[in-house]
Image (cartoon, rainbow, N blue to C red):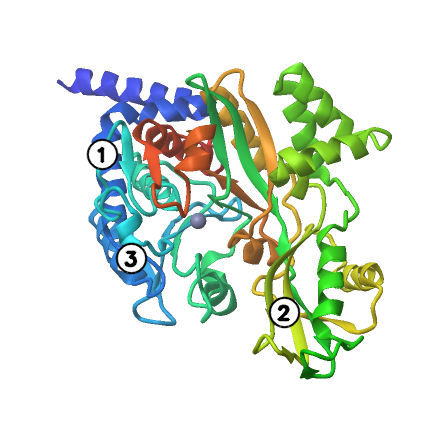
Amino acid sequence: MLAWSQSLRMKIGTLAILFAGCALAQSTRVDWEKQRPEVLEHFRDLIRIDTSSPPGNETKAVDYLRKTLEDNGIGTQTFALNPNRANLVARLKGNGSKRPLLILAHTDVVPVQREKWPLDPFGAILKDGYVWGRGSTDDKPILTALLMTMLELKRTGAALDRDVIFLAESGEEADPTGVGINFMVAQHFKEIEAEFAVTEGGGAVIENGRVVAVNIGTAEKLPARVRLVVNGTSGHGSVPKEDNALIHLGGAVEKVGTWRTPMRLSDTTRTYFEKLAQMSPPEKAARYNALLNPATAEEAQNYLAKNDPRRYSMLRTSVVPTMLKAGVGPNVIPSQAEATLDIRALPDENIPAFYEQMKRVIGDPAVKIEPIPMTRPPSPASRLDTEMYKTLERVAKEMYPGTTVLPTMSTGASDMAQLRAKGIPSYGIGPAATENDSTNFGAHSDVERLPESSLYPLVEYAWRTVSEVAVRR
Ligand SMILES: [Zn+2]
């Protein structure tokens, strides 16, 4: 008996050394096939908790997460500016030889119009191989993946070189009162301070049943909206006036709306288009390569402007008129007219200089540019040569041989902005979907759904990447 147990101990010891010496082998310590029911259960449970904002009620999701974590021996803390909209932090301690890693997901979802939904938006119904429901793509897959990562790190008893901090944050989708990331960064930054962060903001592309590309979010544009305001003299609609505010505003909106702002590539977008060209069929590849050459970029931009506006937006600070306000009656010349421009700036844009440039494009002193207070800070792109990025890239290639890994700049905004602005390089990951699913059944839609088969690889990807940067080798 003794000999047997000794030899078993030796075998375990040898195995441990083998595992320690081979990062990839870490993943074999979790039988993901076996974890599937638990993964699916957490995912569906979290969708069933209605955290649509407003009002959010994210504390209900926090209660669920706290119980799950604490049942598994992981201590938690909650931080709430508003008791109904709490944030939860859980920390697995490392030996401190490396700085912490922050993994975070938001618990809130956007509201639903129930009558537009084909299925109960909070039913987490499994149908045709999909899990349907609000939050099934944004952001409960990531929340589930990071929760499972914590649970498995704890269960495997992995020795950590760094703390792994889990943050379930409220108010990402709409946060006029700053209950989520703004509150955590402003009041409890030491609880989440880390060398790197991983959260939503990436994804993967399925073509013909295969993952052909993995997007890792490394940068995002900055909303830098303005109002164009024109004041003129009011009067009777039967008497034309040259200072009519509507005429001046109309001219300005047309000029800025059709203005081709300067194209500028960054490390992220240059790499993105280079790699996209490498994986694309010849005609598309030629177009992406043309963007990289100033002599041919113009024509390629024309094509994208017409046919691929999202990628066109990745090339530049974009200016999009979104609202008009003027007039009280058909026979009254209004004394004021205004337009809202949704400007999305490249991460390194000099905003005041950009507004000056826009003023010259408008070329009409009657039109005043009034910046709208920003809701997020300017944030630098996260580097592509960090341990975290390289690990996200390597594990993606291991899990999906032959796939292309694309660093991606989001044209939208996320809570990574606040973290990057505080000096934490932050990276976005996400589940795999076909073009059809991400375009027609994606985030914020009335038919939001996730292929069940995309959930499990996301969980494994999160666990493996976190393990490789945090578990002691
Ligand atoms: Zn989201």
| Mark sitting on residue 62 | 3
Residue 461, percent from left and from top: 42, 31
Residue 311, percent from left and from top: 64, 37
Q: SS of the residue at dot 2?
A: loop
The CA span between labels 2 and 3 is 33 Å
Q: Earlier in the sequence, mark 1 or mark 2?
A: 1
Q: SS of the residue at dot 3?
A: helix
* Identity, as a three-letter code, of the amino acid under mark 3: Val
Residue that badge 1 annotates: 126
Q: Earlier in the sequence, mark 2 or mark 3?
A: 3
| Mark sitting on residue 372 | 2
| Mark sitting on residue 1 | none
In this rendered view, identify the residue nearer to me: 8 or 30: 30
Q: In the figure, is residue 258 to the left or right of 110?
A: right
Residues packed near mark 2 inside 10 Å, few (<14), some (14 to 19) or many (20 plus): some
In this rendered view, identify the residue nearer to me: 83 or 446: 446
Question: Can residue 22 be seen by looking at this rendering?
Answer: no
* Identity, as a three-letter code, of the amino acid under mark 2: Ile
Q: Earlier in the sequence, mark 3 or mark 1?
A: 3
Residue 161 vs 340, above or below: the answer is above
* Identity, as a three-letter code, of the amino acid under mark 1: Leu
Q: SS of the residue at dot 1?
A: strand
The CA span between labels 1 and 2 is 43 Å
Can you say which quadrant of the picture contains the N terminus? top left
